[in-house]
Image: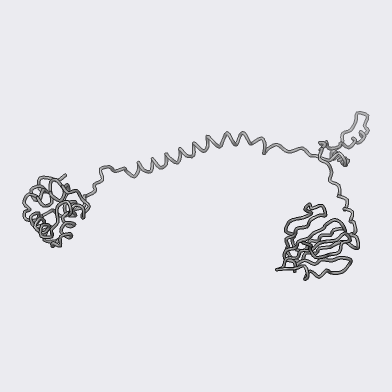
Amino acid sequence: MTDDHTVSAFEAAAGCGERLAQARQAAGLTIDEVAKRLHMPAQVVRHLEQEQWQQLGAPVFVRGQLRSYARLLGVDVGQVLEQAALQPVVPPTLVSHTHTPRARRLAESLGRRLLYVGITAVLAVPVWFATRGHFLDTPPSTASLDVIPATVAVAPSREPSVAADGKAPAPAAPTATPYVASLTPVPRPAAAPAVTPAPSNALNLQFKGDSWVNITAPDGSTVEKAVVKAGQVRSFAPGQVSRVTLGNATAVEVQHNGGIVDLQPFQRANVARFTVSSDGSVVPVSN
């Protein structure tokens, strides 16, 4: 919205719109074509040519629309704006209508902090009282039923009492400290597993590096199909396996009857495939 002074300034401007209309007609353009090129309604173009600034809003918008129109037609922008006699765009002055005293701000800040402390105390104190008993209770001494605790004698008094007949009383029997029986079993050392020696004609696989294996039994079932880590050993008795596939075959050492089996005849692209006969010997895979 413009004030009376702005409206009078708009009405005093003359010749700007007529000059834009003449330049448009000389360029052979219609109002609709100009509106399409400037991406603005055709009614705005008519208001600019008729110098009806009041219909276009604030002076800042009129300046922008006149500048775009003049650039499209090749007219001097500065002269067009000078003929329009539009007031310069002045940023509004910001005036603070409210002022909070410093003492009030400090009081509000202190009040918020006290409120936070009060809320924390309301939530934390019940929880502390509820869990306080768990921290103060002393767990009873426990002992396994398999171990007989030694009796602990009660230390005698430094000044022993004297009986009525003048004789010192007999020393009291030592009192044993009470123990609570625990049902936790006492761990016993595990027996070492029995080591079964492998047969002399067993097939031994020693992995010097990680290798993928696929070992099949004579009935077609899978004995092992996984990645075996370096340092592990596999031993199979005669008749236990029938077919073996070794990935990364150069990292696997195959032994039979105390000798090392050459995998070169069974190897292709670092993958070895061979068949194990009933006596444990290694033969090529039969297709």
Along the line of sight, the residue nearer the viewer: 174 or 287: 287
Residue found at the far front of this picture: 287
Relative to residue 6, is residue 249 drawn left or right?
A: right
Relative to residue 47, is residue 272 drawn left or right?
A: right
Relative to residue 162, is residue 226 drawn left or right?
A: left
Report x, y in % for residue 287: 77, 61
**Residue 256, relative to residue 64: is it above or below?**
below
Quadrant of the snapshot with the N terminus: top left
Picture residue at 93% right of the left edge, 34% below the top: 170
Report x, y in % for residue 181: 83, 36
Along the line of sight, the residue nearer the viewer: 6 or 194: 194
Picture residue at 84% right of the left edge, 59% below the top: 235
Q: Quadrant of residue 73?
A: bottom left
**Residue 284, relative to residue 60: is it above or below?**
below
Report x, y in % for residue 45: 15, 51
Report x, y in % for residue 39: 22, 52
Along the line of sight, the residue nearer the viewer: 219 or 234: 219
